[in-house]
Image (cartoon, grey):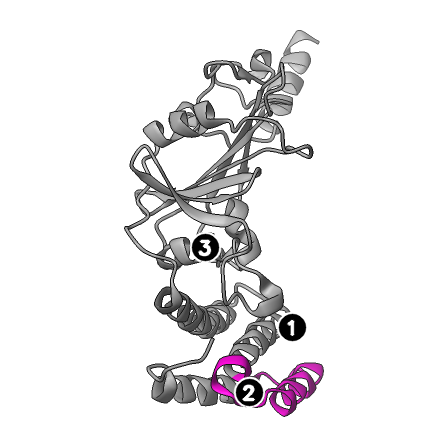
Amino acid sequence: MRRKLLITFLLTISFIPTISFSQNIYDYLILQDIGRYKLDRPEKILPGRPPIGGPEIYDGPGIIGAAGHFTLDHTDKTYKVMYIGGDGLPSPTVQVTQHAGAESDKWLLHEVESIYRDPDILEANLTEGTVLRLIDGNRIFNWGAGTYTWISNNNIVVRIEYVDLTGTKPEPLEVVKAYLRKFPSTIPDMTIDRAHNERWIKDEMERRLWLCDKWFYQLQLKKVELRKTLREVVDHLKVFLDYRERYYGVKATDEKNQLWEYLQANDGTSIKRKLKEYKDWWSNNKEKAIGL
């Protein structure tokens, strides 16, 4: 009987799911109070175990996921924690994402900037209230009473955000400066002017075509299904066509309708042909001046 119980116990242990937990959580998050800001639920941090209900760890690209960051060929790791302000102070949340160093990381700075651009006007300018701010010698994107974002070492994205509906709370600069000491910004010296905006728009058009190639390559490797690939590619091509119409004067309606018909028919061959057509056009026109 004892032997049977032992075997049952060992079988049970062998089937306990393995929890992926980075032993380097302290390398990414400051897991202690920062000045007047108190670490949220420190009792949830136990040695050798994943935090539950306190700091979070999960696979994903973090804040730049909304920018279409390509992740199918690598895994990014995101760490998140909150600090409680109290006494009229805001309670900022910090998100630190370690990117994998894959090819898509070349777009990190571009994608960070994209979350501060207005999609309703095809990101021609930074959203009102956004500045490229200098704090302790570090350049960071800052939007009003709300967010601070920067890249560090070209493969880490730091995002700090808080809510101040009354506009009366002080900035959580103690927290911002603490993370800048831990992860100094590597955003280069640049001016957000007309020339920069033109360069960003052209880079975004190029990135959309690049994303299409990345999706088709994953399809070739049989790591993603055809329907999913075609939907993603057509979405990126439509954005490319919108930019081309807005800044190069090439009408997009007929092209987008044709892409939609190809998508409805699951016609990957025709969509790839259109992608090549757009890439050839882009190669011949990307150095031309555009009007903002």
Name which quarter of the figure residue 52 lies in. Answer: top right
Which mark is drawn over residue 269? 2
Q: Is residue 38 left or right of residue 277?
A: right
Q: CA distance from mark 1 to mark 2?
A: 13 Å
Residue type marked 3? Glu
- Asked whether 113 or 224 is in front, the reply is 113
Q: Secondary structure at mark 3?
A: helix
Q: Choose the circle earlier in sequence order: 1 or 3.
A: 3
Q: What element does badge 1 sit on? A: helix
Task: Count numbered badges in the picture.
Answer: 3
Residue 291 x/y as whole percent: 45, 80
Q: Position of residue 92 (x, y in %)?
A: 56, 28
The vertical placement of 190 against 38, above or below, is: below
Q: Is residue 86 above or below residue 208?
A: above
Residue with the mark numbered 1: 227
Which label belongs to residue 123? none
User: What secondary structure prevails in the magenta region?
Assistant: helix
Q: Callout 1: 10 Å neighbours few (<14), some, many (20+)?
A: some
Residue 62 appears in view? yes
Residue pictured at 30% horizontal, 44% vertical = 186
* Residue type (three-letter) at the residue carrying disc 1: Arg
269 or 97: which is nearer to us? 97
Q: CA distance from mark 3 to mark 2?
A: 34 Å
Q: Is residue 19 visible?
A: no
Stretch of the chain drawn in magenta: 245-269
Closer mark to the observer between disc 1 and disc 3:
3
- Where residue 234 sits, quadrant-wise, is bottom right
CB within 8 Å, label 1 to label 3: no
Residue placed under numbered mark 3 in the picture: 113
From the viewer's perspective, tell me whether residue 181 is left or right of residue 210.
Answer: left
